[in-house]
Image (spheres, rainbow, N blue to C red):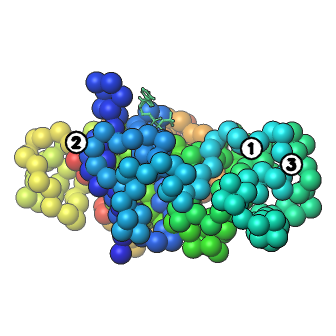
Amino acid sequence: MSFLTLSHLQKSFGSVRVVHDFNMSIEKGEFISFLGPSGCGKTTVLRMIAGFETPSNGSIAIGGKDQTKLRPNQRNIGMVFQAYALFPNMNVFDNVAFGLKVAGKSKAEIKTRVDEMLKLIHLEHLADRYPYQMSGGQQQRVALARALAPAPQVLLLDEPLSALDAKIRVSLREEIRQIQRQLGITTVFVTHDQEEALSISDRIVVMNGGKADQIGTPFEIYNNPATRFVASFVGTLNLIEAKVLDASASQIAIGDQQILLKKPIAKANGEKITVALRPEAGSLAESAKGDVRISGVVTSSHFLGSVIRTRLDVGGALVSFDMFNDPGTAPPALGERIHLNFASEDLMILAE
Ligand code: ATP
């Protein structure tokens, strides 16, 4: 059942529409990410949920109650921003206590709740510190505790990790997800980082030009991208120009090689199409799953640590694949002709 419902949300600034007819039903306790490039409208949708922006059209409901006309402080929503945004003149305790004081809670209630929140973020020992005395990661945990202290119905996180360095980003995102699960709080997280969205979300909304291109689980988004944009934005992808040889026999050509697919192709013979293949779908080893074998000449090879991304020229079409780094096996040499195996179902035919 839908807990947070966004119906036909639109937003224009002047004559420019930046959010077009955005619809979504979010269940209680779900962790949703809005993922998309800069300017696609993620923050604007989030700010409309929070009440900082008024929709030009549409409505927002939480637990069946319409929120569209309520002010931010009437919505029972917690928010964490990209910049730490703690009150610099208050210590950690007072920052976390802020919302509780505004709500008129007693001193004893505030003390109990702040202690509970500091325990949740493992910073009980820093209650007396001021923001300038803490690392960025610690400040964001305090910002999270401050947002959660008044027990909001919905938590909104606007790129909360993007100012942090890579290692802290990964550990803090895991901590946020673990706290979110523990509290069962409905959460919307804005990010432009696909790895972040894939790793922590129940569902992802991939946004493009003010619209949701696809809403799905990380598994669905990655394995069955609905549009070319989703396919290229999420993960690394080969976009390969191919040609339909015989649509009734599901036969296509990539460069100078012929390939038989298992799925029907709704295209005309001779038509040019774009097919997509994840680099990790290809392998040098023949396997039961890999029913397609193409050959090509190695044109580049990049060592990425756990894998070596190798590019092949297949009669004019370029196809990259990832080889697992095996210290016992030398990667193929530049100019070498090799055979690449993959499963025909891993080849995606993209809608234009
Ligand atoms: P980013 O990751 O860069 O924050 P975003 O996907 O969150 O991007 P938004 O901040 O929602 O994008 O902005 C969407 C569009 O709306 C952008 O083109 C932006 O310039 C425009 N926009 C946002 N706020 C305003 C405003 N107050 N007045 C005019 N235009 C705005």
Query: What's the mark number on residue 130?
Result: none
- Residue 298 is at least partly visible in this image: yes
- The answer to the question of whether label 1 and label 3 lie on touching residues, with beta carbons closer than 8 A, is no
Looking at the rendered image, the quarter that the N terminus falls into is: bottom left
Residue 51's place in the image compared with 180, above or below, is: above
Residue drawn at (62%, 66%), measured in percent from left and top? 151
Q: Label 3 belongs to which residue?
A: 91
The image shows residue 129 at horizontal and vertical percentages of: 91, 49
The image shows residue 80 at horizontal and vertical percentages of: 63, 49
Q: Earlier in the sequence, mark 1 or mark 3?
A: 1
Q: Which element is circle 2 on? A: loop
Q: CA distance from mark 1 to mark 3?
A: 9 Å
Crowding at label 1, few (<14), some or many (≥20) Cα neighbours within 10 Å?
many
**Quarter of image, ligand 1:** top left
Q: Earlier in the sequence, mark 2 or mark 1?
A: 1
Q: Is residue 75 left or right of residue 80?
A: left
Hey, what amino acid is under mark 2?
A: Glu
Residue 211's place in the image compared with 31, above or below, is: above
Crowding at label 2, few (<14), some or many (≥20) Cα neighbours within 10 Å?
few
Q: Label 2 belongs to which residue?
A: 352
Q: Is residue 285 left or right of residue 65?
A: right
The image shows residue 341 at horizontal and vertical percentages of: 41, 58
Residue mark closest to the camera, 2 vs 3: 3
Q: CA distance from mark 2 to mark 1?
A: 45 Å
Q: Label 1 belongs to which residue?
A: 86
